Protein backbone atom coordinates (compact mmCIF):
# COMPACT_ATOMS: atom_id res chain seq x y z
CA UNK A 1 0.00 0.00 0.00
CA UNK A 2 1.29 3.46 -0.94
CA UNK A 3 0.67 6.37 1.34
CA UNK A 4 0.94 9.85 -0.15
CA UNK A 5 1.29 12.82 2.12
CA UNK A 6 1.37 16.46 1.08
CA UNK A 7 1.82 19.75 2.84
CA UNK A 8 0.63 23.20 1.90
CA UNK A 9 2.88 26.10 2.72
CA UNK A 10 2.36 29.79 2.30
CA UNK A 11 5.01 32.46 2.13
CA UNK A 12 4.37 35.62 4.08
CA UNK A 13 6.56 38.05 2.15
CA UNK A 14 7.07 41.72 2.80
CA UNK A 15 7.03 44.22 -0.09
CA UNK A 16 10.80 43.99 -0.69
CA UNK A 17 10.66 40.18 -0.89
CA UNK A 18 7.62 40.26 -3.18
CA UNK A 19 9.45 42.61 -5.53
CA UNK A 20 12.53 40.37 -5.52
CA UNK A 21 10.42 37.27 -6.28
CA UNK A 22 8.71 39.03 -9.17
CA UNK A 23 12.06 40.17 -10.60
CA UNK A 24 13.49 36.65 -10.45
CA UNK A 25 10.34 35.18 -11.98
CA UNK A 26 10.55 37.75 -14.78
CA UNK A 27 14.20 36.90 -15.44
CA UNK A 28 13.42 33.19 -15.53
CA UNK A 29 10.51 33.81 -17.91
CA UNK A 30 12.74 35.92 -20.14
CA UNK A 31 15.44 33.21 -20.27
CA UNK A 32 12.90 30.49 -21.07
CA UNK A 33 11.20 32.49 -23.80
CA UNK A 34 14.54 33.56 -25.27
CA UNK A 35 15.76 29.94 -25.40
CA UNK A 36 12.51 28.81 -26.99
CA UNK A 37 12.60 31.60 -29.59
CA UNK A 38 16.24 30.90 -30.40
CA UNK A 39 15.71 27.16 -30.79
CA UNK A 40 12.63 27.61 -33.01
CA UNK A 41 14.48 30.11 -35.21
CA UNK A 42 17.43 27.74 -35.66
CA UNK A 43 15.17 24.81 -36.52
CA UNK A 44 13.25 26.88 -39.10
CA UNK A 45 16.52 27.98 -40.69
CA UNK A 46 17.58 24.35 -40.96
CA UNK A 47 20.78 24.93 -39.00
CA UNK A 48 22.34 22.74 -36.34
CA UNK A 49 20.46 23.07 -33.05
CA UNK A 50 22.72 24.74 -30.45
CA UNK A 51 23.70 22.83 -27.34
CA UNK A 52 22.86 23.98 -23.84
CA UNK A 53 26.37 25.34 -23.45
CA UNK A 54 26.10 27.33 -26.71
CA UNK A 55 22.83 28.88 -25.60
CA UNK A 56 24.26 29.58 -22.16
CA UNK A 57 27.16 31.49 -23.71
CA UNK A 58 24.85 33.45 -26.02
CA UNK A 59 22.61 34.38 -23.11
CA UNK A 60 25.61 35.53 -21.05
CA UNK A 61 26.71 37.76 -23.92
CA UNK A 62 23.17 39.10 -24.23
CA UNK A 63 23.07 39.83 -20.49
CA UNK A 64 26.26 41.91 -20.80
CA UNK A 65 25.01 44.03 -23.68
CA UNK A 66 21.23 44.27 -23.92
CA UNK A 67 19.69 43.85 -20.46
CA UNK A 68 18.83 46.81 -18.28
CA UNK A 69 20.94 47.81 -15.30
CA UNK A 70 18.23 46.50 -12.94
CA UNK A 71 18.34 43.02 -14.45
CA UNK A 72 22.11 42.82 -14.25
CA UNK A 73 21.88 42.86 -10.47
CA UNK A 74 19.99 39.56 -10.39
CA UNK A 75 21.64 36.25 -9.66
CA UNK A 76 22.97 34.42 -12.68
CA UNK A 77 20.97 31.35 -11.73
CA UNK A 78 17.73 33.19 -12.40
CA UNK A 79 18.63 33.34 -16.08
CA UNK A 80 20.36 29.98 -16.46
CA UNK A 81 18.11 27.38 -14.89
CA UNK A 82 14.99 27.70 -17.02
CA UNK A 83 17.05 27.67 -20.19
CA UNK A 84 18.87 24.47 -19.27
CA UNK A 85 15.71 22.76 -18.01
CA UNK A 86 13.99 23.67 -21.27
CA UNK A 87 16.79 22.11 -23.30
CA UNK A 88 16.65 18.90 -21.32
CA UNK A 89 12.89 18.69 -21.88
CA UNK A 90 13.08 19.44 -25.61
CA UNK A 91 16.08 17.23 -26.47
Image (cartoon, grey):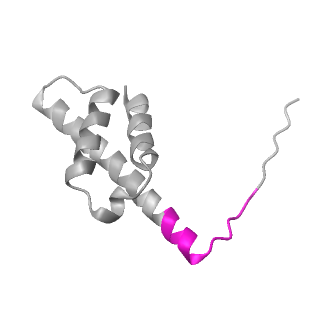
Q: Tell me what residue is drawn at x 88 percent, y 29 percent.
A: 1
Residue 66 image point, x, y percent? 20, 55
Viewer-proximal residue, 31 or 14? 14
Q: Is residue 11 visible?
A: yes
Asked if 14 appears above or below 3 in the picture, the reply is below
As drawn, the residue found furthest toward the bottom would be 15
As drawn, the residue found furthest toward the left would be 45
* Rendered image quadrant of residue 17: bottom right
* Rendered image quadrant of residue 85: top left
* Rendered image quadrant of residue 5: top right
Residue 4 image point, x, y percent? 81, 40
Which span of residues is magenta-colored?
8-21
Asked if 90 appears above or below 7 in the picture, the reply is above
Residue 63 image point, x, y percent? 27, 49
Instruction: Find out whether residue 20 is within the magenta segment.
Output: yes
Q: Quadrant of the C terminus?
A: top left
Q: Is residue 36 visible?
A: no
Residue 11 image point, x, y percent? 67, 65
Would you say 32 lies left or right of 78 here?
A: left
Instruction: Find out whether residue 80 is within the magenta segment.
Output: no
Asked if 33 appears above or below 68 in the picture, the reply is above
Would you say 5 lies left or right of 17 here?
A: right
Q: Tell me what residue is drawn at x 40 percent, y 59 percent.
A: 26
Would you say 22 lies left or right of 67 here?
A: right
Viewer-proximal residue, 53 or 34? 53
Please state the total of marks drawn on the protein image.
0
Q: Tell me what residue is drawn at x 41 percent, y 51 percent.
A: 28
Q: Tell me what residue is drawn at x 56 percent, y 77 percent.
A: 15
As drawn, the residue found furthest toward the top would be 48
Amino acid sequence: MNVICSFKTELDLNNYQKTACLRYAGAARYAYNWGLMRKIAVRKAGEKVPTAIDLHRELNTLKQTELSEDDRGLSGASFELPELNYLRDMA
